[in-house]
Image (cartoon, helix red, strand yellow):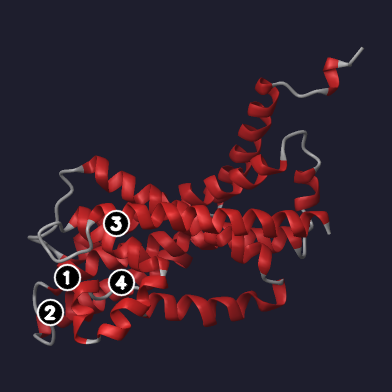
Amino acid sequence: MTDVATVPDRASVGRIFRALLLRDIYVARRELPYFLVRTTLQPLMFIVVFGALLPRMGFVRANYGSALLPGVLAVGLAFSSVQSVALPMVQDFGWTREIEDRLLAPVPMQLIVIEKVVVGIVQGLIAALFILPVARLIMGPIPALSVSNFGLVLLVTLLSASAFSTLGLLMGTAISPQQIGLMFSVIVAPMIFFGCAYYPWQALAVAPVIKYAVLINPLVYVAEGMRAVLTPDLPHMPLAAVMLALIAITALFWTLGFRSFTKRAIS
C-alpha cells in the first residue's frame, strides 16, 4: 500500500510554492532601496536630462517628453524584471549553490522556475509603479499622457514583465558567473539604444533597414506597448501586434530558459 504521507498533495505543493515566493519577496522588500536605485536611476536620469532640462533649454521639442516617458518606463520595467531573475539565478547556480536546496523541495522543478519568474514580474511592476509618478513630477504636465484605460495598461505591463522575466531566466542559467558583467555590456546596452525607448518605432522610417532589423529586439514591443496604452494619440505599433509579440517572446524565452535551467540543475 502506498504511503500517502510521502506524496505531496495539491495543498502542500501550493503551500511550498507560496513559502518560496514569500521568502523571495521578503528578501526583495528588505533590499528595496538598493533595487530601486539599481533599476530606476538610469531611466530617471534620462527623464531629468531629456524630458525636463533639454526641452526647457529649447534643444528638443517640448512634446518630446510624450514619446520619451513610455520608453523610459519600458526600460525600467524590462530591466528590473530581467535583473531580478538573472542575477539571483547566477548566484544560486554559481557561488551560493542555493538552488540545490530549492531542488530538494517536494514540488515539481517547473514550479521552482515559475516562482522565480513570478518574483521577476512582481519586481518589474514595482519599478514601473515607482518610475511613472516620479517621472510625471519631474517632467510636469504631459498633454498626451492618459491612464484612463487602466486595464490595458496593467495587461501590457504584465506581458512586458513576463517577457523579460523569462529572458532573465534564460540569461541567468545560460551564462556563467564570470561572464555576467559582459552580458549586460554586450546585450543590455544595444538592446536599450535599439529598443525604441527614446524614439517611436515609426520614426525609424527614415532608416528602413534598421526599422525592420530592430524587430528582433524584445524591448521594442515593450516600449511600443507602453506608448499604445499611455500615449494612444501619438504614433505607435498596433496594440494587438504588440501583445501577440510579447506572448510569443514569453513562450520562446520560457521554453529555452526552462530547458537551460533543467540542464544546469541535472549537471
Kindly identify which residue carries mark 1: 65
Taking the image as shown, residue 265 lies to the left or right of residue 33, namely right
Kindly identify which residue carries mark 4: 197
Of circles 4 and 2, the one toward us is 4
Kindly identify which residue carries mark 3: 241
x and y percentages locating residue 73 in the rendered image: 31, 62
Amino acid found under the numbered disc labelled 1 = Gly
Amino acid found under the numbered disc labelled 3 = Ala
Q: Is residue 263 above or below residue 106?
A: below
Question: Does residue 127 appear in the picture of this structure?
Answer: no
Q: CA distance from mark 3 to mark 2?
A: 32 Å
In the picture as drawn, the residue positioned furthest to the top comes out as 1
SS at mark 4?
A: loop
Taking the image as shown, residue 173 lies to the left or right of residue 210, namely right
At 14% from the left and 52% from the top, the residue drawn is 146
At 78% from the left and 45% from the top, the residue drawn is 103
For label 1, the crowd category at 10 Å Cα-Cα, with few meaning under 14, some 14 to 19 and many 20 or more, is: many
Q: CA distance from mark 4 to mark 1?
A: 12 Å
